[in-house]
Amino acid sequence: MPIGTMIVVAIVLIVVAVAAAVLSHFLTVSNLKNNAESKIGNAEAKAREIIDDAVKTAETKKKESLLEIKEESIRNKNELEKETKERRSELQRYEKRVLSKEEALDKKSEAIERREAGFTAKEEELKQREAKVKELSQQRVQELERISGLTSEQAKEYLLKTVEEDVKHDTAKMIKELEAQAKEEADKKAKEYVVTAIQRCAADHVAETTISVVQLPSDEMKGRIIGREGRNIRTLETLTGVELIIDDTPEAVVLSGFDPIRREVARIALEKLIVDGRIHPARIEEMVEKAQKEVDTMIREEGESAALEVGVHGIHPELLKLLGRMKFRTSYGQNALKHSVEVAQLSGLLAGEIGLDVRLAKRAGLLHDIGKSIDHDVEGSHIQIGVDLCRKYKESATVINAVEAHHGDVEPETLIACVVQAADTISAARPGARRETLETYTNRLKQLEDITNQFKGVDKSFAIQAGREIRVMVVPEQVSDADMVLLARDIAKQIEFELEYPGQIKVNVIRESRVTDYAK
């Protein structure tokens, strides 16, 4: 085949192929377009269906909502109408009630007005009657004054005097009965507590003196104690402040001094010198120093022993030393340390009986006279000194008040202070505990009689039984039997206020009436 034909055939084939390709493309595009249009049509149809369904559903929902709203509105309307009816009926009831009350008030007001009118009339009538009664009363008083020969003031004074006498008699009788009843109960309990405390706390009492006696092995020792030209005795007296009395008493030397601590130091030093045998000024000075240290140790141990004996702990060491110093202090012949220990024990016993803190009561009782340990070195009463010491060493307010109030300088603020007062009185009033000087004794008797004689109606008074009883003779014309009760009470109160004394003082008022006549 020729090349040209082949070329033509090739070209034809190419054209046919191209035409077929173009035709195939157009067909494919047409198919795709038709498919797309059909899908779009289907989608539009579905969309229209969905829209139609949504519109239908919305219409349905709208109708349902409108129905619900109408139903709710109808229901609310019904409830409102019901509530309105109830309120209206309630208001009607209230209105009826108010109307009835107004009617009742009107009736009451009318009744009150009628009663006021009646009262006004009665008041006027009463005024007239009162004026008439007053007039009649004046006439009666005038007539009574005419008949009795007394004015109204005189009659009033007479009646008041009569009533006063009757009341005084009744008062005295009542006071006597109440006092007897109170004393019966109080004395019974107090005696029970005090007796129990005293029985459970027995103490020895030794009368202290102002001298100490040192026994000597022989009378030869007296000369050695005196020394050459009296040097030894002068040295000892100078260092200790105690006077040595060397007389004809066989084998004994007397140490005289008002300070018991110094006297004790001198006694111990002298005993040591006698045992040592070497007596000269230098040795005396050495022994006095040793004795001083020994006494200081003894004082501390005595204070600790006293606190341990009564079961009181936690006391400041300085207070314990001061307690120990009280071993060498006396009050009316009673050892101050033994007295403090006894007061502590009694305070604890009494506190236990009435349900108080036993340990605190013992502590207050032990320290109540602590001021006496240094009252000769510090100005002021032993009470004030004791209070200052307790505050200095941080004692409790209860203990301080007990120390301050145990002699009645201030009012007791706690029951423990009252207990310490009672225990102090018991310890001081125990038979043989204390002794008084003759001057103090006579002064107390004189004060008792002076206090009694100052009362109106008292003729004579006699202090008897060592000042434990005051016997009062009254003028019978001035003091009646009823007045005697009040007079005895007033005298007892005045004695309590002015005097300090252990125990109690009996006030015995005597009224004697004598009538004398002669048969002729």
Image (cartoon, rainbow, N blue to C red):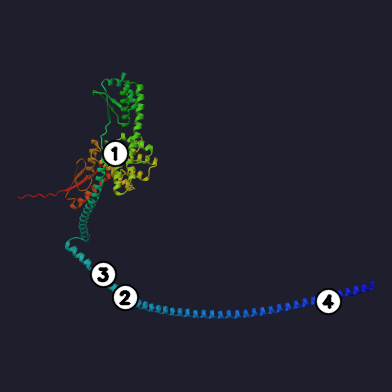
- Find residue 105 and report its horizontal and vertical position in percent: 37, 77
Q: How far apart are the alpha carbons under marks 1 and 3?
A: 77 Å
- Which is more N-terminal, label 4 or label 2? 4
Do labels 2 and 4 touch, CB within 8 Å?
no
Q: Are marks 4 and 3 in contact (CB under 8 Å)?
A: no
Label 2: state its secondary structure: helix
Gap between marks 4 and 1 measured at Cα: 149 Å
Mark 1 nearby-residue class (10 Å; few <14, some 14–19, many ≥20): many
Q: Which element is circle 4 on?
A: helix
Q: Which residue is farthest top?
A: 228
The N terminus - image quarter:
bottom right
Query: Is residue 167 positioned above or below 239 on the image?
Result: below
What residue do we see at 18% from left, 63% from top? 146
Per the rendering, the mark at residue 23 is: 4
Q: Are marks 1 and 3 in contact (CB under 8 Å)?
A: no
Q: Which residue is mark 1?
A: 339
- Other residues around mark 4 within 10 Å, as few (<14) / some (14–19) / many (≥20): few
Q: Secondary structure at mark 1?
A: helix
Q: Is 451 placed above or below 327 here?
A: below
Out of 516 and 241, give the one closest to the viewer.
Answer: 241
**What residue is disc 3 on?**
130
Percent across and percent down for residue 409 are 32, 44
User: Of the residues under marks 1 and 2, which one precedes in the sequence?
Assistant: 2
In front of the other: label 4 or label 3? Answer: 4
Mark 4 or mark 3, which has the lower sequence index?
Answer: 4
Rate crowding at label 2 as few (under 14), some (14 to 19) or many (20 or more) other CA atoms within 10 Å. few
